[in-house]
Amino acid sequence: MERAIGILIGILLGIAIVVAFVFLGSRDTIDDPSIDESGAQTTIEAPATAPPEPAPEVIQLRGGEPVGGVRELTYTKGDQVQISVELDEPQEDVHIHGYDIEFLSPARSADFDFKADIEGIFEIEAHGPSGDVVLAEIRVEPS
């Protein structure tokens, strides 16, 4: 009789161990988002990330002249335009003709950030100690 009780306890312990393994093993798959309800492995795609924003165009004004000459910048209508004008001396103003964007009395830089919503050719110009200086020509083409 004691032997029968020992066998019964052994069987119950074996069943408990099997149930524990099944429960613990299935718990990992339930919490794993790559396994669906049927137990099949699914592919999880990483969320799409936006491409990094382009760095602004940099134009430098040194000794009354644009470094490298007058820049020609081309955009498509609807583009976001970012241009940083770096100055070696304060100016009366720096502006973009046709867009009516102007920085008055910039000391070290003028940072433009606007949507190219007008087609055509537009000059970036500085007015200061060296007179009127064309820094760049912006061309906005149809989309």
Image: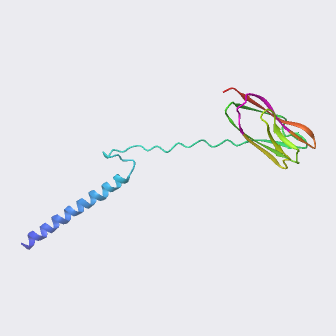
Image quadrant of residue 93?
top right
- Image-based side of 40 in relation to 140, left or right: left
Q: Residue furthest front?
A: 100
Name the residue at 82% across, 39% down.
95
- Colour convention: rainbow
Q: Residue furthest left?
A: 1
What is the x, y in percent for residue 73? Answer: 76, 33
What is the x, y in percent for residue 108? Answer: 83, 49
Name the residue at 17% across, 65% down.
12
- Image-based side of 128 in relation to 95, left or right: right
Q: Main secondary structure of the magenta part?
A: strand
- Image-based side of 137 in relation to 23, left or right: right
Image quadrant of residue 115?
top right
The answer to if 119 sits in the magenta stretch is yes
Q: Which residues are magenta?
A: 114-125
- Foreground of the two, 9 or 35: 35
Image quadrant of residue 99?
top right
